[in-house]
Amino acid sequence: MTTVVHDDAATSADIDRAVEALAGRRVAVLTGAGVSTDSGIPDYRGKGAPVRTPMTAQQFLANDDARRRYWVGSHLGWRAFAAAAPNAGHAALAEMERTGAVSGVVTQNVDGLHLRAGSHRVVELHGTMRRVLCTHCGQVFDRRDLAARVEADNPWITVPERVALGPDGDVLPESTEGFRVPSCTVCGGLLKPDVVFFGEFVPLEKFREAEQLLRGSDALLVAGSSLVVNSGVRLVERARRRRIPIVIVNRGQTRADSTATVKIDAGTTEVLQALSAALTG
């Protein structure tokens, strides 16, 4: 394994090694929160990230106060989260897919930025914040429509112009008193964002979709993920068993550094741009 230190010359040399490992191959990409930090969406574990305790699925489903806290915080952050724009790293991946160098993207992110950047084959492993589901009848709602309903039901809420956005688009609210939690307009059931909460499993069919993308590829590029979440580690392990090249781009250590063909300890945006220039030129 080649490990890069924080040095421009070393990083450039390791990008060259990554290009050598990936050139002429169909590359599956696995992305994490580090790909979206340059779009203004923070991650949970990156350097300087504030300590946050994510809400679990069990807390959300079982506790009225927890749900109220979630929906207040999520609503306060929704406008800024939805306004985040794809960055040059997202664009680089879309360009590599357009030219055939990348076979598709499996993402642990719920921000939809890969699709907005122009990537077409995207497996949203942990779901998307664009949709809200009724846990009782299965009705699907557009998050934008739900936000309008929340504001109509809670006209006293003021969304500040600038917010301290959390990793999943939420904001720590000062108070949740008096907030009316939205419910399903079809059956009155409990609503939940279409995302995999901590404590939940990735749906089997979604993981199989990611596996299928990887099986149709002959290299794996991991970008912006520390691989703490097991779903990502499982995909890397499948690549390792097939003995295909594995390139990891992430600031700081990951759980799969020892299995990487090349590990680049650098920001994803600049590295993905460099890889795109080399692999599509």
Image (cartoon, helix red, strand yellow):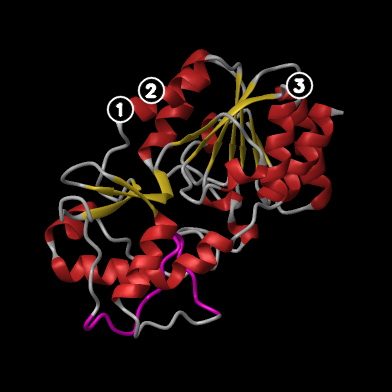
- Residue at 61 percent of width and 52 percent of height: 251
The x and y percentages for residue 53 are 32, 65
What type is the residue that disc 1 sits on? Leu
Dot 2: within a 10 Å radius of its alpha carbon, few (fewer than 14), some, or many (20 or more) residues?
Answer: few
* Residue 15 seen: yes
The x and y percentages for residue 79 are 50, 67
Q: Quadrant of residue 75?
A: bottom left
Q: Is residue 151 left or right of residue 164?
A: left
Q: Helix, strand or loop at disc 2?
A: helix
Measured Cα–Cα span from mark 1 to mark 3: 32 Å
Residue reaching furthest to the right? 281
Which sits earlier in the primary sequence, circle 1 or circle 3?
Answer: 3
Do the numbered discs 3 and 2 sit on residues whose CB atoms are within 8 Å? Answer: no
The x and y percentages for residue 163 are 51, 77
Q: Quadrant of the N terminus?
A: top right
- Residue at 18 percent of width and 43 percent of height: 137
Do the numbered discs 2 and 1 sit on residues whose CB atoms are within 8 Å? Answer: yes
Q: Is residue 250 left or right of residue 266?
A: left
Do the numbered discs 1 and 3 sit on residues whose CB atoms are within 8 Å? Answer: no
Q: Nearer the viewer, residue 187 or 27?
A: 187
Q: Which residues are magenta?
A: 162-178
Q: Nearer the viewer, residue 275 or 249?
A: 275
What residue is pinned by disc 3? 23
Which disc is residue 208 wearing?
A: 2
What type is the residue that disc 2 sits on? Arg
Mark nearer the viewer, 1 or 3: 1
What residue is pinned by disc 1? 204
